Amino acid sequence: MTIGIDLELDTREKLVIGHRGAPNEAPENTLKGYAAAWELGADMVELDVQQTKDGALVCIHDYDLCRTTTGEGTVAETDLVGIRPLDAGDGEKVPLLSEVLDMAKGNFALDIELKSEGIEERVLHLVNEYDMLGSVVFSSFSEDSVLSLKEMSGRAAVGLIVKSAEHKVLDRILELGLDFVAPLFYQLSEESVSYAHESNLFVYPWTVNDEEYMWQMLDYDVDGIITDVPGLCAPIIDEYLKNV
């Protein structure tokens, strides 16, 4: 049971979603990391998109450059020419969203998390340029961002990232007309997943890195697992699907 995913990509019924790629194997939010996640069996790669000072769409999680690159300052206050020379780990560069779309097309799906507000139209336009709307989902912590995306393209699969799976939170997501919810995994219960499914809301918990909790999430009948360790998660989901 998946949404917004081109079936030609041959995804699992329950998705393995590499969180920022495969950060235990390669630097997070880099082309090397995304490729590693795919090679380890991820159906989908989650990535973070921000806008530079001069309007470039780049893939990096933190608003500050210092944790994951050799740079200083913030992404929003730095031009692309100042970001591209930076080392994002193992000699990798901070990738452009266009580079990631080029890599992923026909190979694996993407969960594009918008970290900057106001970039929704440009991100959606770029995804459409690559004819990848069927293999991309969009997510954000920002209600404004997800609403903008949904209003601009009713076809797009859009979800809200949340820290709770209480009924009132799920009800709000349904009220917004969204397609999925990405809650903190330890806030989930079997009942809350069932409640979401009753309203055709898909559930992708984050960030599940322990084998015991992966099995627990599958027992709850989630639709995919966001994880830092897709190489651990993929065989577990495969084993689960063999026995259901």
Image (cartoon, rainbow, N blue to C red):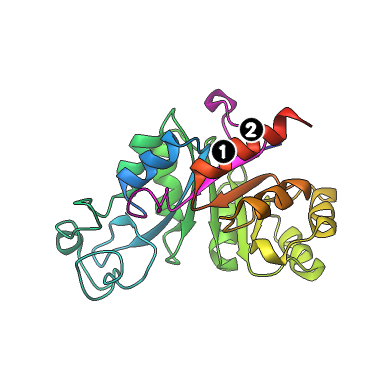
**Label 2: how many residues lie within 10 Å, few (<14), some (14-19) or many (20+)?**
some
The residue carrying mark 1 is 234
* 196 over 75 or under it: above or below: above
Quadrant housing the C terminus: top right
State the residue lying farthest toward the top: 8
* 237 over 91 or under it: above or below: above
- Main structural element of the magenta stretch: helix, strand or loop? loop
Percent from the top left, x then y, of residue 79?
20, 65
Does 4 sit left or right of 86 as displayed?
A: right
**Quadrant hosting residue 37:** top left
The residue carrying mark 2 is 238
Q: Specify whether residue 143 is in view.
A: yes
Within the magenta stretch, is there residue 17?
A: yes
Within the magenta stretch, is there residue 156?
A: no
Tag 2 secondary structure? helix
**Which residues, given as a range, are shown in magenta?**
3-28
Image point (20%, 61%), residue name: 83
State the residue lying farthest toward the front: 212
Marks 1 and 2 sit apart, C-alpha to C-alpha, by 6 Å
Percent from the top left, x then y, of residue 235?
59, 36
Q: Specify whether residue 98 is in view.
A: no
Image point (64%, 64%), residue name: 184
Contact (Cβ within 8 Å) of mark 1 with mark 2 = yes
Tag 1 secondary structure? helix
**Label 1: how many residues lie within 10 Å, few (<14), some (14-19) or many (20+)?**
many
Percent from the top left, x then y, of residue 232?
54, 44
Instruction: Tell me which amino acid carries mark 1.
Output: Ala
Instruction: Tell me which amino acid carries mark 2.
Output: Asp
